[in-house]
Amino acid sequence: MEFVVSLFLLCCVFVIVVKCDSGPLIDVVVDRYDIPSVCPREVGTEDFVRYHFNGTFFEGGKKFDSSHDRGNAFISQVGLGRMITGMDRGIMGMCVNERRKITIPPHLAYGSIGTGGVIPPDAVLVFDILLLDIWSSDDKVQISTISKPEKCKRTVEASDYVRYHYNGSLLSGTYIDTSFSSNKTYDTYVGKGDLIQGMEEGLLGMCVGERRIVVVPPFLGYGEKGYGTKIPPQATLVFEVLLVDLFNTNDDMEVVITRLAKNCTRKTVKGDYIRYHYNGTFLDGSAFDSSYKRNSTYNTYIGMGYVILGMDRALQGLCIGERRRVVVPPHLAYGEQGVEDLIPSSAVLVFDIDVIDFHNPKDPIEIKVTHKPKECNMTSEGDDMIQYRYNCSLMDGTLLYSSDHYDSAPITTLGANKVILGLDDGLKGMCVGEKREVIVPPHLGHGENGASGVPKSAVLFFELELLSLSKGVPDGYMFVWLGDSPDPLFPAMDLNGDHEVPLEEFSAFIMIQVSELKGRLRPGMDASVIIKDMFDNQDRDKDGKIVLDELKLKAEEDSDKARHEEL
Protein backbone atom coordinates (compact mmCIF):
# COMPACT_ATOMS: atom_id res chain seq x y z
CA MET A 1 0.00 0.00 0.00
CA GLU A 2 1.32 3.37 -0.99
CA PHE A 3 0.47 6.65 0.75
CA VAL A 4 1.86 10.17 0.95
CA VAL A 5 2.62 11.78 4.32
CA SER A 6 3.95 15.16 5.23
CA LEU A 7 5.86 16.10 8.35
CA PHE A 8 7.12 19.47 9.45
CA LEU A 9 10.56 18.48 10.60
CA LEU A 10 13.31 20.96 11.34
CA CYS A 11 11.23 23.60 9.60
CA CYS A 12 11.10 21.58 6.38
CA VAL A 13 8.35 19.51 4.74
CA PHE A 14 9.22 16.01 3.65
CA VAL A 15 7.05 14.09 1.21
CA ILE A 16 7.77 10.37 1.27
CA VAL A 17 6.42 7.45 -0.73
CA VAL A 18 6.54 4.29 1.38
CA LYS A 19 6.10 0.71 0.27
CA CYS A 20 4.73 -1.27 3.22
CA ASP A 21 5.90 -4.85 3.54
CA SER A 22 3.49 -7.39 4.82
CA GLY A 23 3.96 -8.38 8.43
CA PRO A 24 2.21 -8.70 11.73
CA LEU A 25 -0.28 -5.85 12.28
CA ILE A 26 0.44 -3.67 15.32
CA ASP A 27 -2.16 -0.92 15.81
CA VAL A 28 -1.83 2.58 17.26
CA VAL A 29 -1.90 2.78 21.05
CA VAL A 30 -3.69 5.84 22.45
CA ASP A 31 -3.38 7.02 26.05
CA ARG A 32 -5.98 9.72 26.79
CA TYR A 33 -4.34 10.92 29.96
CA ASP A 34 -5.98 14.39 30.20
CA ILE A 35 -9.54 14.82 28.97
CA PRO A 36 -11.46 18.12 29.43
CA SER A 37 -14.73 17.92 31.35
CA VAL A 38 -16.60 19.60 28.49
CA CYS A 39 -16.12 18.48 24.93
CA PRO A 40 -18.56 20.09 22.49
CA ARG A 41 -16.81 18.64 19.45
CA GLU A 42 -14.54 15.72 18.59
CA VAL A 43 -12.13 15.39 15.68
CA GLY A 44 -13.68 13.70 12.68
CA THR A 45 -12.63 12.75 9.18
CA GLU A 46 -11.74 15.77 6.99
CA ASP A 47 -11.58 18.08 9.98
CA PHE A 48 -8.70 20.49 10.18
CA VAL A 49 -6.68 20.45 13.39
CA ARG A 50 -4.08 22.61 15.05
CA TYR A 51 -2.03 20.98 17.78
CA HIS A 52 1.20 21.04 19.67
CA PHE A 53 3.31 17.90 20.00
CA ASN A 54 6.50 16.42 21.34
CA GLY A 55 7.81 13.52 19.29
CA THR A 56 10.04 10.89 20.93
CA PHE A 57 11.30 7.39 20.12
CA PHE A 58 9.66 4.57 21.98
CA GLU A 59 13.06 3.05 22.64
CA GLY A 60 15.19 5.38 24.76
CA GLY A 61 12.70 8.26 24.79
CA LYS A 62 14.94 10.56 22.76
CA LYS A 63 13.11 13.58 21.32
CA PHE A 64 13.27 13.92 17.55
CA ASP A 65 10.87 16.84 16.98
CA SER A 66 8.68 19.33 18.87
CA SER A 67 6.27 22.05 17.78
CA HIS A 68 6.75 23.60 21.21
CA ASP A 69 10.42 24.12 20.45
CA ARG A 70 9.60 25.80 17.15
CA GLY A 71 6.93 27.95 18.74
CA ASN A 72 4.37 27.10 16.04
CA ALA A 73 1.57 24.58 16.34
CA PHE A 74 1.20 21.95 13.64
CA ILE A 75 -1.77 22.34 11.25
CA SER A 76 -3.19 19.62 9.05
CA GLN A 77 -6.33 17.86 7.85
CA VAL A 78 -7.42 14.53 9.27
CA GLY A 79 -8.25 11.34 7.36
CA LEU A 80 -7.09 12.34 3.90
CA GLY A 81 -3.53 10.99 4.04
CA ARG A 82 -1.92 14.32 4.81
CA MET A 83 -0.42 12.94 8.01
CA ILE A 84 1.16 9.57 8.73
CA THR A 85 -1.53 6.93 9.09
CA GLY A 86 -0.91 6.37 12.77
CA MET A 87 -1.41 10.07 13.50
CA ASP A 88 -4.56 10.13 11.37
CA ARG A 89 -5.96 7.30 13.49
CA GLY A 90 -4.61 8.43 16.83
CA ILE A 91 -6.02 11.95 16.66
CA MET A 92 -9.55 10.90 15.76
CA GLY A 93 -12.12 11.69 18.45
CA MET A 94 -9.92 14.20 20.26
CA CYS A 95 -11.35 17.23 22.05
CA VAL A 96 -9.82 20.68 22.19
CA ASN A 97 -7.50 20.89 25.21
CA GLU A 98 -7.26 17.12 25.40
CA ARG A 99 -3.83 15.61 25.86
CA ARG A 100 -2.97 12.23 24.35
CA LYS A 101 0.08 10.05 24.11
CA ILE A 102 -0.06 8.23 20.77
CA THR A 103 2.30 5.33 20.17
CA ILE A 104 2.65 4.49 16.46
CA PRO A 105 4.25 1.33 15.08
CA PRO A 106 6.63 1.68 12.11
CA HIS A 107 4.23 0.46 9.43
CA LEU A 108 1.81 3.24 10.43
CA ALA A 109 4.63 5.78 10.59
CA TYR A 110 7.80 5.84 8.44
CA GLY A 111 8.21 2.11 8.00
CA SER A 112 11.44 0.33 7.14
CA ILE A 113 12.94 3.35 5.41
CA GLY A 114 12.67 6.07 8.02
CA THR A 115 13.07 9.67 6.86
CA GLY A 116 15.60 12.41 6.53
CA GLY A 117 18.23 10.87 8.70
CA VAL A 118 16.09 11.78 11.69
CA ILE A 119 13.67 8.87 11.87
CA PRO A 120 15.57 5.55 11.57
CA PRO A 121 14.02 2.52 9.86
CA ASP A 122 11.41 0.54 11.82
CA ALA A 123 11.16 3.16 14.53
CA VAL A 124 8.23 3.14 16.92
CA LEU A 125 7.22 6.76 17.49
CA VAL A 126 5.53 8.36 20.46
CA PHE A 127 3.68 11.66 20.09
CA ASP A 128 2.52 13.64 23.10
CA ILE A 129 -0.24 15.85 21.69
CA LEU A 130 -2.22 18.85 22.95
CA LEU A 131 -5.13 19.64 20.64
CA LEU A 132 -5.66 23.40 20.25
CA ASP A 133 -8.24 23.76 17.51
CA ILE A 134 -10.73 21.94 15.27
CA TRP A 135 -12.61 23.24 12.28
CA SER A 136 -14.11 22.11 9.02
CA SER A 137 -14.42 23.79 5.66
CA ASP A 138 -18.18 23.47 6.09
CA ASP A 139 -18.20 25.32 9.40
CA LYS A 140 -20.26 28.44 9.80
CA VAL A 141 -20.22 31.15 12.43
CA GLN A 142 -21.70 29.73 15.62
CA ILE A 143 -23.84 32.08 17.68
CA SER A 144 -25.05 31.40 21.21
CA THR A 145 -27.14 33.99 23.04
CA ILE A 146 -26.19 34.34 26.70
CA SER A 147 -28.74 37.01 27.60
CA LYS A 148 -31.12 39.28 25.75
CA PRO A 149 -33.31 42.21 26.86
CA GLU A 150 -37.02 41.49 27.09
CA LYS A 151 -37.75 44.42 24.80
CA CYS A 152 -35.78 44.78 21.61
CA LYS A 153 -37.05 47.47 19.27
CA ARG A 154 -34.16 47.26 16.86
CA THR A 155 -31.44 44.83 15.82
CA VAL A 156 -28.16 45.24 14.01
CA GLU A 157 -28.36 45.41 10.23
CA ALA A 158 -25.74 45.85 7.53
CA SER A 159 -24.51 49.48 7.30
CA ASP A 160 -25.30 50.13 10.99
CA TYR A 161 -22.66 51.55 13.27
CA VAL A 162 -22.16 49.63 16.51
CA ARG A 163 -20.28 49.99 19.76
CA TYR A 164 -19.63 46.79 21.66
CA HIS A 165 -17.49 45.29 24.37
CA TYR A 166 -15.82 41.93 23.86
CA ASN A 167 -13.63 39.27 25.37
CA GLY A 168 -11.63 37.42 22.73
CA SER A 169 -9.98 34.02 23.06
CA LEU A 170 -8.83 31.08 20.99
CA LEU A 171 -10.89 27.90 20.93
CA SER A 172 -8.56 26.51 23.56
CA GLY A 173 -9.48 29.39 25.88
CA THR A 174 -6.21 31.21 25.46
CA TYR A 175 -6.78 34.93 26.01
CA ILE A 176 -6.42 37.20 22.98
CA ASP A 177 -7.81 40.59 23.86
CA THR A 178 -10.57 42.45 25.72
CA SER A 179 -12.17 45.86 25.47
CA PHE A 180 -13.30 45.77 29.09
CA SER A 181 -9.81 46.36 30.50
CA SER A 182 -9.55 49.74 28.76
CA ASN A 183 -13.24 50.50 29.34
CA LYS A 184 -13.47 51.53 25.71
CA THR A 185 -15.86 49.90 23.32
CA TYR A 186 -14.91 48.68 19.87
CA ASP A 187 -16.68 50.98 17.43
CA THR A 188 -17.25 50.14 13.79
CA TYR A 189 -19.62 49.86 10.86
CA VAL A 190 -21.19 46.49 10.14
CA GLY A 191 -21.29 45.05 6.64
CA LYS A 192 -18.71 47.39 5.15
CA GLY A 193 -15.65 45.16 5.43
CA ASP A 194 -14.21 46.84 8.49
CA LEU A 195 -14.42 43.61 10.52
CA ILE A 196 -13.46 40.02 9.92
CA GLN A 197 -16.28 38.29 8.08
CA GLY A 198 -17.20 36.06 11.00
CA MET A 199 -17.71 39.00 13.33
CA GLU A 200 -19.74 40.80 10.68
CA GLU A 201 -22.09 37.82 10.66
CA GLY A 202 -22.01 37.39 14.42
CA LEU A 203 -23.18 40.95 15.13
CA LEU A 204 -26.17 40.88 12.78
CA GLY A 205 -29.51 40.68 14.55
CA MET A 206 -28.16 41.72 17.96
CA CYS A 207 -30.09 43.97 20.34
CA VAL A 208 -28.51 46.62 22.51
CA GLY A 209 -27.80 44.95 25.84
CA GLU A 210 -27.61 41.46 24.32
CA ARG A 211 -24.70 39.15 25.11
CA ARG A 212 -23.53 36.54 22.63
CA ILE A 213 -20.83 33.97 22.16
CA VAL A 214 -19.60 34.15 18.58
CA VAL A 215 -17.34 31.33 17.35
CA VAL A 216 -15.53 32.22 14.13
CA PRO A 217 -13.79 29.52 12.05
CA PRO A 218 -10.34 30.46 10.77
CA PHE A 219 -11.37 31.05 7.15
CA LEU A 220 -13.91 33.65 8.39
CA GLY A 221 -11.35 35.11 10.78
CA TYR A 222 -7.68 35.87 10.12
CA GLY A 223 -7.04 32.73 8.06
CA GLU A 224 -3.58 31.48 7.20
CA LYS A 225 -1.82 34.68 8.19
CA GLY A 226 -3.19 35.07 11.68
CA TYR A 227 -2.86 38.46 13.31
CA GLY A 228 0.01 39.81 15.37
CA THR A 229 1.56 37.67 18.03
CA LYS A 230 -1.64 36.55 19.76
CA ILE A 231 -3.67 35.10 16.90
CA PRO A 232 -1.82 32.23 15.21
CA PRO A 233 -2.49 31.11 11.64
CA GLN A 234 -5.70 29.10 11.11
CA ALA A 235 -7.12 29.90 14.53
CA THR A 236 -10.75 29.56 15.50
CA LEU A 237 -11.76 32.64 17.47
CA VAL A 238 -14.27 32.88 20.30
CA PHE A 239 -15.77 36.25 21.16
CA GLU A 240 -18.06 37.08 24.03
CA VAL A 241 -19.84 40.19 22.77
CA LEU A 242 -21.94 42.77 24.63
CA LEU A 243 -23.70 45.22 22.31
CA VAL A 244 -23.66 48.68 23.88
CA ASP A 245 -24.84 50.95 21.11
CA LEU A 246 -26.40 50.89 17.68
CA PHE A 247 -27.35 53.50 15.10
CA ASN A 248 -27.39 54.26 11.43
CA THR A 249 -26.11 57.43 9.81
CA ASN A 250 -29.57 57.90 8.30
CA ASP A 251 -31.19 57.90 11.74
CA ASP A 252 -33.10 60.94 12.92
CA MET A 253 -33.79 61.68 16.56
CA GLU A 254 -36.58 59.68 18.14
CA VAL A 255 -39.09 61.35 20.45
CA VAL A 256 -41.58 59.49 22.64
CA ILE A 257 -44.01 61.35 24.90
CA THR A 258 -44.01 59.58 28.26
CA ARG A 259 -46.40 61.95 30.04
CA LEU A 260 -48.89 64.36 28.52
CA ALA A 261 -49.29 67.79 30.04
CA LYS A 262 -52.61 68.89 31.51
CA ASN A 263 -54.33 71.97 30.06
CA CYS A 264 -51.57 72.79 27.59
CA THR A 265 -52.32 76.23 26.15
CA ARG A 266 -48.88 76.99 24.80
CA LYS A 267 -45.98 75.04 23.33
CA THR A 268 -42.31 75.89 23.07
CA VAL A 269 -41.00 77.54 19.93
CA LYS A 270 -37.63 78.70 18.71
CA GLY A 271 -36.36 81.60 20.79
CA ASP A 272 -38.08 80.51 24.00
CA TYR A 273 -36.09 79.98 27.18
CA ILE A 274 -36.74 76.64 28.87
CA ARG A 275 -35.98 75.05 32.23
CA TYR A 276 -36.09 71.27 32.36
CA HIS A 277 -34.84 68.34 34.36
CA TYR A 278 -33.26 65.35 32.64
CA ASN A 279 -31.63 61.99 33.08
CA GLY A 280 -29.05 61.19 30.43
CA THR A 281 -28.21 57.58 29.62
CA PHE A 282 -26.66 55.55 26.85
CA LEU A 283 -28.66 53.01 24.88
CA ASP A 284 -27.65 50.22 27.25
CA GLY A 285 -29.18 52.16 30.14
CA SER A 286 -25.96 53.25 31.84
CA ALA A 287 -26.20 56.84 33.11
CA PHE A 288 -23.81 59.62 32.19
CA ASP A 289 -25.48 62.72 33.66
CA SER A 290 -28.54 63.94 35.57
CA SER A 291 -29.84 67.38 36.51
CA TYR A 292 -31.74 65.77 39.38
CA LYS A 293 -28.49 64.80 41.09
CA ARG A 294 -27.38 68.43 40.94
CA ASN A 295 -30.83 69.55 42.13
CA SER A 296 -30.75 72.20 39.43
CA THR A 297 -32.63 72.37 36.15
CA TYR A 298 -30.88 72.76 32.83
CA ASN A 299 -31.74 76.21 31.48
CA THR A 300 -31.26 77.24 27.86
CA TYR A 301 -32.66 79.01 24.83
CA ILE A 302 -34.36 76.82 22.25
CA GLY A 303 -33.31 76.58 18.61
CA MET A 304 -30.34 78.89 18.98
CA GLY A 305 -27.48 76.37 19.06
CA TYR A 306 -26.84 76.37 22.79
CA VAL A 307 -27.43 72.61 23.05
CA ILE A 308 -26.72 69.64 20.76
CA LEU A 309 -28.69 69.73 17.51
CA GLY A 310 -30.92 66.78 18.34
CA MET A 311 -31.94 68.26 21.69
CA ASP A 312 -32.46 71.69 20.13
CA ARG A 313 -35.05 70.14 17.85
CA ALA A 314 -36.62 67.93 20.50
CA LEU A 315 -37.23 70.88 22.83
CA GLN A 316 -39.62 72.50 20.37
CA GLY A 317 -43.35 71.84 20.64
CA LEU A 318 -43.27 71.01 24.36
CA CYS A 319 -45.80 71.87 27.06
CA ILE A 320 -45.09 72.69 30.67
CA GLY A 321 -45.34 69.46 32.65
CA GLU A 322 -44.73 67.26 29.61
CA ARG A 323 -42.22 64.45 29.76
CA ARG A 324 -40.40 63.05 26.76
CA ARG A 325 -37.81 60.43 26.00
CA VAL A 326 -35.45 61.68 23.31
CA VAL A 327 -33.04 59.33 21.54
CA VAL A 328 -30.30 61.29 19.79
CA PRO A 329 -27.94 59.61 17.28
CA PRO A 330 -24.28 60.70 17.44
CA HIS A 331 -24.41 62.86 14.30
CA LEU A 332 -27.04 64.98 16.07
CA ALA A 333 -25.17 64.85 19.40
CA TYR A 334 -21.42 64.83 20.11
CA GLY A 335 -20.36 62.86 17.03
CA GLU A 336 -17.11 60.99 16.72
CA GLN A 337 -15.32 63.26 19.19
CA GLY A 338 -17.65 62.68 22.13
CA VAL A 339 -16.91 64.50 25.39
CA GLU A 340 -13.77 63.61 27.29
CA ASP A 341 -14.39 61.40 30.31
CA LEU A 342 -18.16 61.66 29.81
CA ILE A 343 -19.49 60.81 26.33
CA PRO A 344 -17.72 58.13 24.26
CA SER A 345 -17.08 58.60 20.57
CA SER A 346 -20.14 57.98 18.38
CA ALA A 347 -22.49 57.39 21.30
CA VAL A 348 -26.27 57.37 20.99
CA LEU A 349 -27.73 59.43 23.84
CA VAL A 350 -31.06 58.97 25.59
CA PHE A 351 -32.59 61.87 27.48
CA ASP A 352 -35.64 61.59 29.72
CA ILE A 353 -36.74 65.21 30.10
CA ASP A 354 -39.35 66.87 32.31
CA VAL A 355 -40.35 70.41 31.34
CA ILE A 356 -40.55 72.67 34.40
CA ASP A 357 -41.34 75.94 32.63
CA PHE A 358 -40.51 78.09 29.65
CA HIS A 359 -41.00 81.68 28.57
CA ASN A 360 -40.03 84.15 25.91
CA PRO A 361 -37.96 87.23 26.77
CA LYS A 362 -40.74 89.35 25.23
CA ASP A 363 -43.50 87.81 27.36
CA PRO A 364 -45.72 90.12 29.44
CA ILE A 365 -47.39 88.93 32.59
CA GLU A 366 -50.48 86.77 32.12
CA ILE A 367 -53.54 87.58 34.23
CA LYS A 368 -56.58 85.38 34.70
CA VAL A 369 -59.40 86.67 36.92
CA THR A 370 -60.84 83.74 38.85
CA HIS A 371 -63.30 85.73 40.98
CA LYS A 372 -64.60 89.28 40.86
CA PRO A 373 -67.11 90.88 43.27
CA LYS A 374 -70.43 92.09 41.84
CA GLU A 375 -69.75 95.56 43.14
CA CYS A 376 -66.42 97.13 42.25
CA ASN A 377 -66.39 100.91 42.77
CA MET A 378 -62.65 101.29 43.18
CA THR A 379 -59.62 99.46 41.71
CA SER A 380 -55.98 99.43 42.70
CA GLU A 381 -53.44 101.60 40.93
CA GLY A 382 -50.01 103.10 41.42
CA ASP A 383 -49.37 104.74 44.82
CA ASP A 384 -52.24 102.83 46.42
CA MET A 385 -51.60 100.97 49.60
CA ILE A 386 -53.01 97.47 49.49
CA GLN A 387 -53.15 94.34 51.56
CA TYR A 388 -53.27 91.07 49.67
CA ARG A 389 -53.10 87.32 50.07
CA TYR A 390 -50.88 85.21 47.83
CA ASN A 391 -49.47 81.80 47.01
CA CYS A 392 -46.31 81.76 44.91
CA SER A 393 -45.42 78.54 43.06
CA LEU A 394 -43.27 77.28 40.24
CA MET A 395 -45.09 76.24 37.09
CA ASP A 396 -44.81 72.57 38.08
CA GLY A 397 -46.86 73.31 41.20
CA THR A 398 -43.97 73.48 43.66
CA LEU A 399 -45.03 75.97 46.35
CA LEU A 400 -42.35 78.53 47.15
CA TYR A 401 -44.06 81.05 49.43
CA SER A 402 -47.49 81.79 50.84
CA SER A 403 -48.92 84.64 52.87
CA ASP A 404 -50.71 81.96 54.86
CA HIS A 405 -47.35 81.09 56.40
CA TYR A 406 -47.25 84.45 58.20
CA ASP A 407 -49.31 86.03 60.96
CA SER A 408 -50.80 88.63 58.64
CA ALA A 409 -51.08 89.27 54.93
CA PRO A 410 -48.50 91.66 53.44
CA ILE A 411 -49.15 95.36 52.90
CA THR A 412 -47.43 97.26 50.11
CA THR A 413 -47.63 100.45 48.12
CA LEU A 414 -48.05 99.85 44.42
CA GLY A 415 -45.45 101.42 42.17
CA ALA A 416 -43.00 101.93 45.01
CA ASN A 417 -40.64 99.10 43.99
CA LYS A 418 -41.61 97.13 47.05
CA VAL A 419 -42.34 93.91 45.13
CA ILE A 420 -41.11 92.39 41.85
CA LEU A 421 -42.34 94.27 38.78
CA GLY A 422 -44.56 91.46 37.49
CA LEU A 423 -46.36 91.11 40.80
CA ASP A 424 -46.74 94.88 41.08
CA ASP A 425 -48.40 94.95 37.66
CA GLY A 426 -50.50 91.90 38.48
CA LEU A 427 -51.94 93.63 41.58
CA LYS A 428 -53.10 96.69 39.68
CA GLY A 429 -56.66 97.10 38.51
CA MET A 430 -58.04 94.81 41.23
CA CYS A 431 -61.18 95.27 43.32
CA VAL A 432 -61.23 94.39 46.98
CA GLY A 433 -62.26 90.74 47.12
CA GLU A 434 -61.07 90.00 43.59
CA LYS A 435 -58.97 86.88 42.96
CA ARG A 436 -56.45 86.40 40.19
CA GLU A 437 -53.93 83.97 38.80
CA VAL A 438 -50.85 85.78 37.51
CA ILE A 439 -47.95 84.24 35.58
CA VAL A 440 -44.75 86.27 35.88
CA PRO A 441 -41.84 85.61 33.46
CA PRO A 442 -38.37 85.82 35.02
CA HIS A 443 -37.46 89.16 33.41
CA LEU A 444 -40.39 90.63 35.37
CA GLY A 445 -39.62 88.45 38.38
CA HIS A 446 -36.31 87.47 39.96
CA GLY A 447 -34.40 87.21 36.68
CA GLU A 448 -31.45 85.03 35.80
CA ASN A 449 -30.03 85.10 39.33
CA GLY A 450 -33.18 83.97 41.10
CA ALA A 451 -33.64 84.72 44.80
CA SER A 452 -33.70 82.91 48.10
CA GLY A 453 -35.76 79.80 47.39
CA VAL A 454 -36.45 80.90 43.80
CA PRO A 455 -34.48 79.12 41.06
CA LYS A 456 -32.65 81.04 38.38
CA SER A 457 -34.80 82.16 35.44
CA ALA A 458 -37.94 80.69 37.01
CA VAL A 459 -41.42 81.53 35.77
CA LEU A 460 -43.60 82.24 38.80
CA PHE A 461 -47.28 81.47 39.31
CA PHE A 462 -49.18 83.67 41.76
CA GLU A 463 -52.64 83.15 43.23
CA LEU A 464 -53.74 86.58 44.46
CA GLU A 465 -56.62 88.00 46.47
CA LEU A 466 -56.98 91.72 47.23
CA LEU A 467 -58.02 92.12 50.87
CA SER A 468 -58.01 95.89 51.31
CA LEU A 469 -57.27 99.03 49.35
CA SER A 470 -56.33 102.53 50.46
CA LYS A 471 -56.00 105.02 47.66
CA GLY A 472 -52.60 106.60 47.62
CA VAL A 473 -50.84 109.83 46.74
CA PRO A 474 -47.88 110.44 44.42
CA ASP A 475 -44.42 109.87 45.77
CA GLY A 476 -43.18 112.92 47.69
CA TYR A 477 -46.66 114.07 48.69
CA MET A 478 -48.50 113.65 51.97
CA PHE A 479 -51.84 115.05 50.81
CA VAL A 480 -53.43 115.63 47.40
CA TRP A 481 -56.60 117.30 46.25
CA LEU A 482 -58.92 115.01 44.35
CA GLY A 483 -60.39 117.96 42.52
CA ASP A 484 -59.82 121.70 42.56
CA SER A 485 -58.78 123.11 45.91
CA PRO A 486 -60.96 125.86 47.54
CA ASP A 487 -60.35 129.27 46.01
CA PRO A 488 -59.50 131.29 47.95
CA LEU A 489 -57.97 128.68 50.24
CA PHE A 490 -57.34 130.62 53.46
CA PRO A 491 -60.98 131.56 54.22
CA ALA A 492 -61.90 127.89 53.79
CA MET A 493 -59.21 126.88 56.26
CA ASP A 494 -60.26 129.60 58.75
CA LEU A 495 -63.25 127.72 60.03
CA ASN A 496 -64.11 130.23 62.82
CA GLY A 497 -63.26 133.32 60.74
CA ASP A 498 -60.72 134.82 63.20
CA HIS A 499 -58.04 135.22 60.46
CA GLU A 500 -55.71 132.69 62.00
CA VAL A 501 -55.57 128.92 61.81
CA PRO A 502 -54.00 126.99 64.68
CA LEU A 503 -53.09 123.28 64.42
CA GLU A 504 -56.44 122.04 65.75
CA GLU A 505 -58.38 124.09 63.21
CA PHE A 506 -56.02 123.08 60.36
CA SER A 507 -56.40 119.42 61.33
CA ALA A 508 -60.20 119.70 61.36
CA PHE A 509 -60.13 121.32 57.90
CA ILE A 510 -57.98 118.56 56.38
CA MET A 511 -60.08 115.77 57.86
CA ILE A 512 -63.24 117.41 56.46
CA GLN A 513 -61.67 117.29 52.96
CA VAL A 514 -60.78 113.64 53.38
CA SER A 515 -64.22 112.69 54.69
CA GLU A 516 -65.93 114.52 51.81
CA LEU A 517 -63.55 112.75 49.32
CA LYS A 518 -62.15 116.10 48.22
CA GLY A 519 -58.63 115.26 49.35
CA ARG A 520 -56.48 112.25 50.28
CA LEU A 521 -53.80 111.67 52.87
CA ARG A 522 -50.91 109.29 52.22
CA PRO A 523 -52.10 105.85 53.29
CA GLY A 524 -50.20 103.77 55.78
CA MET A 525 -49.12 106.70 57.95
CA ASP A 526 -50.57 108.28 61.09
CA ALA A 527 -52.90 111.08 59.89
CA SER A 528 -52.02 113.31 62.87
CA VAL A 529 -48.32 113.04 62.03
CA ILE A 530 -48.93 113.95 58.39
CA ILE A 531 -51.19 116.92 59.31
CA LYS A 532 -48.66 118.18 61.88
CA ASP A 533 -45.94 118.01 59.21
CA MET A 534 -48.14 119.90 56.74
CA PHE A 535 -48.97 122.52 59.39
CA ASP A 536 -45.32 123.06 60.33
CA ASN A 537 -44.51 123.51 56.65
CA GLN A 538 -47.07 126.39 56.41
CA ASP A 539 -46.33 127.99 59.79
CA ARG A 540 -43.35 129.98 58.60
CA ASP A 541 -42.72 132.00 61.78
CA LYS A 542 -43.34 128.96 64.01
CA ASP A 543 -45.80 130.81 66.24
CA GLY A 544 -48.30 127.98 66.32
CA LYS A 545 -50.75 129.43 63.78
CA ILE A 546 -51.05 130.06 60.06
CA VAL A 547 -52.05 133.49 58.76
CA LEU A 548 -52.91 134.65 55.26
CA ASP A 549 -49.48 136.15 54.54
CA GLU A 550 -47.73 132.88 55.43
CA LEU A 551 -50.00 130.94 53.08
CA LYS A 552 -49.41 133.45 50.26
CA LEU A 553 -45.63 133.35 50.77
CA LYS A 554 -45.61 129.58 50.69
CA ALA A 555 -47.72 129.51 47.55
CA GLU A 556 -45.37 131.99 45.83
CA GLU A 557 -42.31 129.91 46.75
CA ASP A 558 -43.92 126.77 45.37
CA SER A 559 -44.78 128.63 42.13
CA ASP A 560 -41.22 129.96 41.75
CA LYS A 561 -39.82 126.49 42.38
CA ALA A 562 -42.06 124.99 39.71
CA ARG A 563 -41.02 127.61 37.14
CA HIS A 564 -37.36 127.01 37.97
CA GLU A 565 -37.73 123.27 37.45
CA GLU A 566 -39.42 123.85 34.08
CA LEU A 567 -36.47 126.01 32.99
Image (spheres, rainbow, N blue to C red):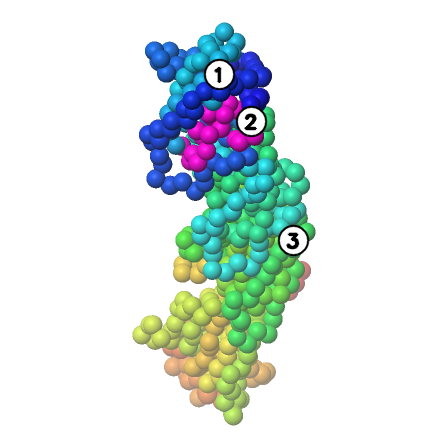
First in sequence, mark 3 or 2: give its number. Answer: 2
Horizontal side, residue 294 vs residue 48: left or right: left
Query: Nearer the viewer's eye, disc 3 or disc 2?
Result: 2
Magenta stretch: dominant secondary structure? loop
Q: Quadrant of the N terminus?
A: top right
As drawn, the residue found furthest toward the bottom would be: 374
Q: CA distance from mark 3 to mark 1?
A: 68 Å
SS at badge 3 = loop
Task: Using the image, tell me which numbered label, if any, was put on residue 251.
Answer: 3
First in sequence, mark 1 or 2: give its number. Answer: 2
SS at badge 1 = loop
Horizontal side, residue 41 vs residue 246: left or right: left
As drawn, the residue found furthest toward the left would be: 407
**In this picture, is 479 found above or below 455?**
below
Residue sitting at 67 percent across and 41 percent down? 192
Q: Which residue is mark 2?
A: 81
Q: CA distance from mark 1 to mark 2?
A: 15 Å
Indicate the quadrant where residue 130 lies. top left
Label 1: how many Cα within 10 Å (few below 14, some 14–19, many 20+): many
Answer whether residue 59 is magenta in the image: no
Indicate the quadrant where residue 368 lies. bottom right
Task: Using the image, tell me which numbered label, if any, was put on residue 111.
Answer: 1
Contact between marks 1 and 2 (CB within 8 A): the answer is no
